C-alpha cells in the first residue's frame, strides 16, 4: 500500500485491501481473507477470475506470438474478429480494436464525424463514457469535466429518458446521438419502455447516427448478449470493452460496413490494436459466453438477485429504490453509500458505487445462487448497522 501510495498518481479512491489472488467469483487478500467479488473488477471479470479457459488461452498464445502490429495479418486476430461479428447485432460487422472503453468511444466519435461530415454529438445528462478528452467531453458529471475545460466542442447534453429532448437538440450539423442503453455510473438507470425505440426512429428520420456505449451493458450482463437487444434496436456504431478479452485490456468499436468505410488508411490506429494475446483470450471469452449461455444465466440469476434485493427494500427504510436488469443492479440509498461499501468489505464482499447514493452490483456472470445469498445476508447486516449509526436522518447529500 505504501509503495502504491508513494509512486502511483493519486487518482483512484483506494480501498484498504491488497488483493493477490482470484478464482471464479472469489478473490483473496494478502492475508488470505476471502471476498466475493460483486464488482467483477468494474465489470471486467464477467467470467470470474482466472477462468481455466482464459488461463489456457493466455498460456498457449504466450508461447506463439504476443504482439503483432495490425499492419501485419494474424491468425488469432482474424479468428477473434469473426467470432465477434457472428454475435454482434445484425449489420454491425466491421470492427476497430483498441485497448479500453474510452478508446472505443474516441473511435466512435471520430468515425461519426468522418462518416457524416458533421460535428455535433448529442449525449445524455447523467451519462458516463470515460475520461480521455473526447470521451470526457461526452461524460456528464461536472466533477470529472470542470478541471479540464475547455473540452472537445460541439457536444451537447440533453435530459435522459425523454426522446423529445433529443429531437429538439438535433440540428443540420448533428452527426450522432451517443448514449448508454442503461446508464451505469449514472446510477444504474434503466430507460422507460419505448424510449430507445423512439430514439432509434428519430435518428433514422433525421439521418443522425446512433452510437450505443455498451461498455458496461454487453457480454450478457443485462440478460441479452448486448443491452440494445432488450429493446430490439440496433445502433449504427457500438462501443464495447471491459470483459471481451477475459480480463486483458480491450476496446472494440463495431459499426455498419458503410459507416466504417468512411475511415481511410492512417486516419485511426493504435499500436496495440488487436494484439494476438488479447485476441486469443477474446476468442476463449466469447466461446465461454456462448457455450455456457451466460446471458440467459444473467437473466434468471438477475431476477433472483433483484427479488432478494426488493425483499431487503421492504425491511430497510434506508433503501430508496432497486433498479437494474440482469446482473447489472443498483440499490439506491437515502444516504451516501460509502459506509455500506466499507462495511461490506469488512464482511468479505466487494461492491462499488454508481454515483454517491447507489450501491452497484456487477457480479461475475458465473456467480452461484448460494454466493448471491451470502451477498444478500451481508448487505442485510450492513444496512442494519448503517441505519443504527445514522438513525432515520434523511439523505446527507
Ligand atoms: C459505459 C461506459 N463507457 C465507457 C467507460 C470507459 O471505459 P474505460 O474505463 O475502459 O476507459 C466505462 C467505464 O466504466 C463505462 O462504464
Image: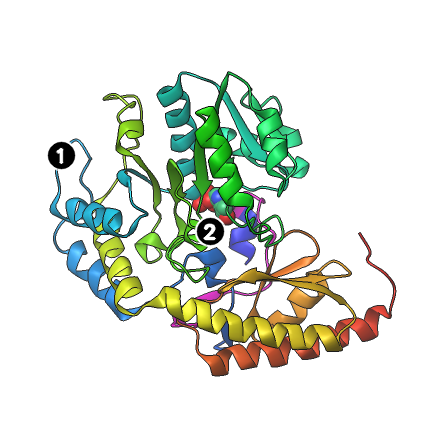
Residue located beneath label 1 in the image: 72
* Whether residue 28 is situated above or below residue 221 in the rendered picture: below
The local crowd at label 2, few if under 14, some if 14 to 19, many if 20 or more residues have their Cα within 10 Å, is few
Q: Is 90 displayed left or right of 20 in the figure?
A: left
Q: Name the side, left or right, on which 59 lies relative to 252.
A: left
Magenta span of residues: 7-26
**What coloring was used for the rendering?**
rainbow
Measured as percent of width and height from the top left, residue 198 is found at 53, 40
- Please tell me which residue is depicted at 47% across the width and 73% down the height of the picture: 301
Q: Is mark 1 within 8 Å of ligand 1?
A: no
Which is more toward the observer, 209 or 41? 209
Is residue 48 depicted above or below 9 in this figure?
below
Mark 1 or 2: the one toward you: 2
State the residue position of label 2.
231
Of the numbered discs 1 and 2, the one sitting upstream in the chain is: 1
Give the structural element (helix, strand or loop) at label 1. loop
In percent of width and height, residue 210 lies at 44, 34
Distance CA(mark 1)–CA(mark 2): 39 Å
Residue at image x 34%, y 46%? 250
Residue 138 falls inside the magenta stretch: no
Of 213 and 241, nearer the camera is 213
Residue beneath the point at 26% across and 49% down? 84
The answer to whether residue 191 shows anywhere in this view is yes
Residue 214, compared with residue 164, is above or below; it is below
Residue 243 locus on image (x, y percent): 38, 55
Any part of residue 347 in sight: no
Q: SS class of the residue under badge 2? A: loop
Q: Is 10 a magenta residue?
A: yes
Circle number at residue 159:
none
Image quarter of residue 246 = bottom left
Amino acid at each position: 500500500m505504501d509503495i502504491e501510495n508513494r509512486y502511483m498518481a493519486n487518482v483512484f479512491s483506494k480501498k484498504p485491501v491488497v488483493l493477490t489472488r482470484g478464482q471464479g467469483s472469489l478473490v483473496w487478500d494478502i492475508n488470505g481473507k476471502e471476498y466475493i467479488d460483486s464488482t467483477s473488477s468494474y465489470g471486467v471479470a464477467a467470467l470470474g477470475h482466472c477462468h481455466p479457459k482464459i488461463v489456457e488461452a493466455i498460456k498457449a498464445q504466450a508461447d506463439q506470438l504476443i504482439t503483432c502490429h495490425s499492419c501485419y495479418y494474424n491468425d488469432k486476430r482474424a479468428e477473434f474478429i469473426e467470432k465477434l461479428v457472428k454475435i454482434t447485432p445484425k449489420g454491425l460487422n466491421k470492427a476497430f480494436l483498441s485497448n479500453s472503453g474510452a478508446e472505443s468511444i474516441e473511435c466512435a466519435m471520430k468515425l461519426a464525424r468522418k462518416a457524416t461530415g458533421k460535428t455535433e454529438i448529442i449525449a445524455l445528462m447523467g451519462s458516463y463514457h470515460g475520461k480521455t478528452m473526447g470521451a470526457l467531453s461526452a461524460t456528464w458529471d461536472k466533477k470529472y469535466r470542470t478541471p479540464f475545460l475547455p473540452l472537445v466542442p460541439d457536444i451537447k447534453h440533453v435530459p435522459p429518458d425523454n426522446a423529445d429532448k433529443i429531437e429538439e437538440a438535433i440540428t443540420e450539423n448533428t452527426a450522432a446521438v451517443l448514449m448508454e442503453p442503461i446508464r451505469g455510473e449514472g446510477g444504474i438507470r434503466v430507460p422507460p419502455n419505448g424510449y430507445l425505440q423512439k430514439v432509434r426512429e428519430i435518428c433514422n428520420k433525421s439521418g443522425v447516427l446512433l452510437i450505443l456505449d455498451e461498455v458496461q451493458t454487453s457480454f450478457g450482463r443485462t440478460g441479452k448478449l448486448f443491452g440494445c437487444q432488450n429493446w430490439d434496436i440496433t445502433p449504427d456504431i457500438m462501443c464495447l470493452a471491459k470483459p471481451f478479452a477475459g480480463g486483458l485490456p480491450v476496446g472494440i468499436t463495431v459499426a455498419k460496413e458503410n459507416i466504417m468505410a468512411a475511415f481511410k488508411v492512417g486516419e485511426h490506429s493504435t499500436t496495440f490494436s488487436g494484439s494476438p494475446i488479447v485476441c486469443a483470450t477474446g476468442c476463449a471469452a466469447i466461446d465461454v459466453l456462448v457455450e455456457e449461455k451466460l446471458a440467459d444465466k444473467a437473466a434468471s440469476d438477475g431476477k433472483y438477485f433483484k427479488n432478494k434485493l426488493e425483499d431487503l427494500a421492504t425491511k430497510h427504510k434506508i433503501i430508496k429504490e432497486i433498479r437494474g436488469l440482469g446482473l447489472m443492479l443498483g440499490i439506491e440509498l437515502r444516504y451516501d453509500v460509502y459506509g455500506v461499501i466499507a462495511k461490506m468489505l469488512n464482511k468479505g464482499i466487494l461492491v462499488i458505487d454508481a454515483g454517491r447514493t447507489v450501491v452497484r452490483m456487477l457480479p461475475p456472470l458465473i456467480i452461484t445462487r448460494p454466493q448471491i445469498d451470502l451477498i444478500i445476508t451481508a448487505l442485510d447486516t450492513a444496512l442494519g448497522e448503517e441505519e443504527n449509526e445514522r438513525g432515520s436522518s434523511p439523505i446527507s447529500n
